Amino acid sequence: MAVVLPAYNAAKTLRQTVAEIPRDLVDDVILTDDCSKDETIAVARELGLHVVAHDRNRGYGGNQKSCYAAALARGADIVVMLHPDYQYTPHLVTAMAGMIASGHYDAVMASRILGNGALAGGMPRYKYVFNRLLTAFQNLVMGQKLSEYHTGYRAWNRTVLERLPLLACSDDFVFDNEMVAQAAWFDFRIGEISCPTKYFAEASSINFRRSCIYGLGCVRTAIVYRLAKMKLVRSALFESGDEARLDADDAARTELRPVRV
């Protein structure tokens, strides 16, 4: 089992995040650095993580593609994606992995909405409202029943990561939403677990303008999903060919540069 950390300027929170990862269960911790301007790589080296660095900034979605490609290449059967900014508690890694290992779910989302902890944890009210409206819209259009589509804390079994055409997804923040839509399209079983969240100065967060761009991308994803289900359009997001899948035997496909520790 692997925990992957898509990192960008995470030096201030990385130690605290890694300290709470349950190492008795986790076999591998992989940090993929997206050209950080701080000491993220140096801190990751001190912590003994497997570090991979991008030669150029590839965006949040591009960073995740690299994380998952590296985890597959290193043989992970379950992969938990955890932000290294300490916004989500690493203590839930065990529970999320257990839900997949039990065979009941193929993917698990750590929901900030279940348990009413989002606002208590400091989520800006406009983001909470956007979250609820977008989630209601996507559930209606896509025929799902998730409490939220927008959490950055997820767990996947290996089959999901090998099957989804992730290279067709955006390299921007809407990657998260497109990946969930893909999992629903290919009928993978998605579970949820309640997760507290923290909003503070060092935690990464997109501004209002980027939030609006992300929201419009989510709306587009849901509409394309429904139209594709109705066979009115075709989208590379929902094609089953091999050309858009991650290749565990060819990490160079995601332009990774290993950092020797």
Image (cartoon, helix red, strand yellow):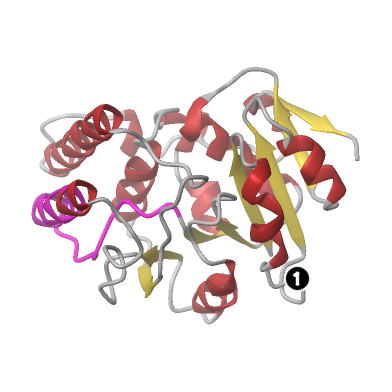
Say which residue label 1 marks.
23
The front one of 116 and 2 is 116
Q: Is residue 157 left or right of residue 146?
A: right
Q: Identify the amino acid type marked 1.
A: Arg
Q: Which residue sits furthest front? A: 201
Q: How many marks?
A: 1
Q: Is residue 250 above or below residue 71?
A: above
Identify the residue at image location x=40%, y=70%: 195
Tell me: residue 216, above or below residue 118.
above
The residue at the point 54 percent across, 51 percent down is: 83
Q: Label 1: state its secondary structure.
A: loop
Q: Quadrant of residue 63?
A: top right
Residue 84 in the figure: left or right of residue 116: right
Crowdedness of circle 1 by 10 Å Cα count: few (<14), some, many (20+)?
few
Viewer-proximal residue among 236 and 65: 65
* Residue 97, image x, y percentages: 56, 72
Which quadrant of the figure has residue 16? bottom right
Q: Name the residue furthest top.
A: 56
- Which span of residues is magenta-colored? 130-152
The residue located at (30%, 48%) in the rendering is 181
Q: Quadrant of the N terminus?
A: bottom right
Q: Where is residue 107 drawn, in percent x and y? A: 44, 63
